[in-house]
Image: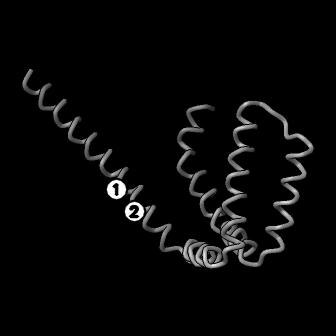
Amino acid sequence: NNKRKDTLSSLFRLRRKTMSNIYDLANELSRTLRDLPEYKAVVESRKAVDADSEAKNLLKDYLAFQQELQAMAQSGQMPTQEVQDKMKSFGDKIQGNPALTEFFNKQQQLSIYLADIERIIFDPVQELLK
């Protein structure tokens, strides 16, 4: 009985250590991402957007519009012609603003890394669903 308690105690300690290691790895990944040149490029391009009041306001409005679109999608609503026109208008305005164009280009470059990392992290979960 004591041996069983010792074994269980060891397993719980190992599980705590493993969980701690997983969180340590996640925090290390976060720090490593921040050191990527692509991440730093997004940070710098965001500073350029924030320094340009027109770009900053357009980004704020665009992000609010994106949230509206997400809410519509989640509720199963299809975009109306008015919403589609607004999407096109935002696209045109963003393309016409060099700071925002650069910001979204840099963000796209970073997203390649993030998609790869997401695939790697969720691979074990996908294996469970096969």
Query: Is disc 1 placed on a helix, strand or loop?
Result: helix
Give the answer, above or below, for where 84 lies relative to 34: above
Q: Is residue 29 left or right of residue 79?
A: left
Which residue is drawn at the image coordinates 66% and 69% (left, top)? 56
Which residue is drawn at the image coordinates 75% and 44% (left, top)? 69
Image disc number at residue 24: 1
Give the answer, above or below, for where 59 lies relative to 122: below
What colouring method underlies this structural image? one colour
State the residue position of label 2.
Answer: 28
**Quarter holding residue 41:** bottom right
Q: Nearer the viewer, residue 31 or 43?
A: 43
Query: Is disc 2 placed on a helix, strand or loop?
Result: helix
Task: Residue 101: give x, y in percent of width and height.
Answer: 76, 73
Quadrant for the N terminus in the image: top left
Quadrant for the C terminus in the image: top right
Pointer 1 and pointer 2: residues touching (CB < 8 Å)? yes
What amino acid is at disc 2? Glu
Q: Is residue 75 left or right of residue 29?
A: right
Task: Residue 125: give x, y in percent of width and height.
Answer: 55, 38
Q: Nearer the viewer, residue 56 or 109?
A: 56
Q: Is residue 63 left or right of residue 93?
A: left
Task: Residue 35: give x, y in percent of width and height.
Answer: 48, 74
**Quarter holding residue 87:** bottom right
> Extreme left residue here?
2
> Extreme top residue here?
1
Which residue is drawn at the image coordinates 72% and 73% (left, top)? 54
Q: CA distance from mark 1 to mark 2?
A: 6 Å
